Structure formats: structure tokens, C-alpha cells
Amino acid sequence: MALYQRFKNSFVKKIPIVQQRLEQLQLEISARRYMKSLMAKRELPKLNAAEIEEAKSYFKSRGYKLKNTYWHRYYKGINGEFHKDYMPYDIFNPRINPMLNQRRQWPALLDKNFTYHLFREFNQPKRIVQNINGFYYVNDKIVDLQKAIDTVRVIKSKLIIKPTIDTGRGKMVNTFSVINSKTTHKDYSIEKLFRIYGKNFVVQEFLEQSDVLKALNPSSLNTLRILTYLNNEGVHILSSVLRVGKLGSSTDNFSTGGLFCGILNNGALKGKGYNPKGDVVTETPTGVSLKDCKIPNFKNVQEMVKAMHHIVPYFKIIAWDIGLNKDDLPYLIEYNTHKLGVDMQIADGPLLGNFTDEILALALKKPRLSYSY
């Protein structure tokens, strides 16, 4: 019996390790498939031998094996700049992110319906109707379907509907208005629109954005993607980019044809933006020069994301999407701890900035079993 118990305990202890490795392999495979899809869309020059050696040596000296330099080639091929510390997806996604961000907190804390409670002290778009696990809510009270429909029907302003769980890349994010009890989204009734989303969604007032951001593209809510890192000294901003949607689109996602541009610490844009085709962009679709644009109230944006990060210390690296209202006040649109938008380093340089070495070391030192539990 004692021998059986020892064998059982030994076997049980190995299960999380095996699970961790399988998940890691799955993320590595997914990252490589994504890279192949990106490389297939464009012809990019190869890195020279010195650059390849520099990148591999950098990661090797910090305890990581850089299996290929495709990501370095991809980033340099688009922005013309080589950095040895560019963060490849197939290192960041399977090894860095899971070690710094507690996966057991996903997706509960990332439910967009829950962010209204988590960050209640901070500006967020006004919620009209929420659906949480199939239950309709208005002002935090459960209501029936008809009450939810009636609540939306009387709203005269522009609205937005989006899923609240397992979202990304603007998937199923739609804007609409209500005219004669019909929505302007495919002329659906409100009830039919609700049925399509099923459960776990939110209807919000569309944020009337800052004149500065609206001028870049009026059809989309153009946002600031701010990446923050939490350590014992506080919250640090790693990277900041502006995301602008393509003309006619209601979302600002890079993957759906938008552009992004790096933001300097004083709020000024870096002057060169990039689109999914790999083109260098100096003007927005509306003809606004990026180099002449400065984000208003950017200091308050930085202070806001730092204050919010303290509320969710389970995640040491967070990508915040922040909008500015018509008075230039920052509003939380959403926060991300899984799909962080690593592509933003095309526009703003190496993802982890001055904290790259610290974060790489931390991911190695963190207890292995915390990967999934």
C-alpha cells in the first residue's frame, strides 16, 4: 500500500508539469503558424549573419533558446530597425506571459461585464444593458428580455454591442442606432440582435471621442494601447501606441486594416505609423500628419493605467485600451492579459523596453507549477 501511495503521489505531481509542457508546445506551434501566415503575405529581406548571431546570443545569455529569427526579420522588414531584444511570439506567449500572468484568473477577471465593478472608480463607457451568463441586467438588477429591449429602444444616441468573454481583434464588435424599433445593424430588431450574441455581451453608449482622435478617423473609436508592468517598485509603462481604424470601420484593430503609431512620453506621435500590409504611414486615412499630432491629456492617461494596474496584481503585464472622450478625459475601453498585441513593437520598439532583462529573468525564476495553477 505504501509503495502504491508513493507511486500515486509521484504520478500526480507530474501531471501539472506534463500539462504545462503540452500547453507550451501548443502555444509555440500556434505562434509559428501565425508567423508563417504573416511571412506569406509579404517579401521581407533576410537578416544578415551578424544580426542573427546577435539576437541568438542575446537570448542565450539570458537562458532562452531563440529557435529562429523570423520575428526579428519580420519587425525589421517592416520598420527598418533591428533590435536584438525584439520579443518573439514563440517566446513571449508560451514562456513569458503565462509565468507573469496567473492563468487561473482567466477568463473571470477579464469578463468585460466585470470590469465595471473592478474599475468602478475610473471612467468607462456607459453601460445600457448587460447579459451575464444569459441573465439580462440593467443598472446591476436582473430584468427580463422585454425590459432589456425596452431599455435599448429609448436610447437615441449611437450604441455599441460586443461580447464580454473570449474577445479580441474586434470580433463581433458592432455599432448601431435604433430607429423605429429597428437597429441600423442589418436592420435587425433589438431582440434578433440579442439572440445573435446569445449570452455574455454588453450594450454601451458609443464614446463621443476627443476631437483630436476623431480627426484621425471619425468612423472608429481610436484608442491608446498602453502596456504596463508591475513589480515591487510600482507600475511601469513599457510601450505606448495609438491605434486608428481604417475608413468606414467601427473598430481600430490593426488586424482589420487599421494602423498604429508609437507615442512618445510627452504624448507626441513618433511620426511613422504602420498598417497590416507592412506599409510605412505618415498620414491617417483622413490626411492628418502623424508627426504633427499630439495626444491630449496623455499624462492623465499614464496615471490612470498605473492606478488601475494595482487593482489586478495577479497580472504583472497588462495591455490597456484607453479612449478619450470629447473633453479629452481618459476612459477604459478594455484591458488584456492574454492577447497583448505583441505586434505593437513594430511601431514602438522592443516590447518590454528597459525591463526586458528583468522580465526574462523573472519568467525563469518563477515556480514552474504556477504556469497553470
Image (tube, rainbow, N blue to C red):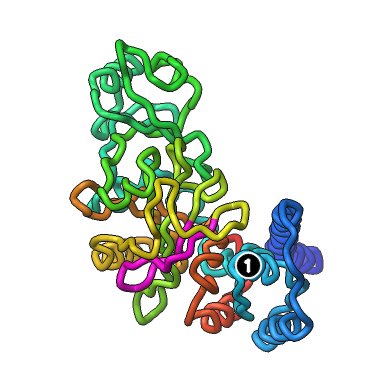
- Picture coordinates of residue 254 (x, y %)? 53, 50
> What is the span of residues highlighted in magenta in the rendered image?
260-274
Question: Relative to 150, is 161 on the left or the right?
Answer: right
Mark 1 surroundings: few (<14), some (14-19) or many (≥20) residues within 10 A? many
Examine the rendered structure and indicate whether residue 320 appears above or below residue 194.
Answer: below
Magenta segment includes 235: no
Q: Is the magenta region chiefly helix, strand or loop?
A: strand
> Which residue occupies the extreme top position in the image?
180
Rendering quarter of residue 6: bottom right
- Picture coordinates of residue 153 (x, y %)? 28, 18
- Picture coordinates of residue 309 (x, y %)? 35, 64
Which amino acid does the dot numbered 1 rest on? Tyr
> Which residue occupies the extreme left position in the image?
327
> Residue placed at 43% from the left, 35% from the top?
162
The answer to whether residue 22 is visible is: no
The answer to whether residue 216 is visible is: yes
Which residue corresponds to mark 1?
75
Under tag 1, what secondary structure?
Answer: helix
Q: Nearer the viewer, residue 171 or 16?
A: 171
The quarter of the image holding the N terminus is bottom right
> Residue placed at 28% from the left, 45% from the top?
209
> Residue placed at 41% from the left, 77% from the top?
231
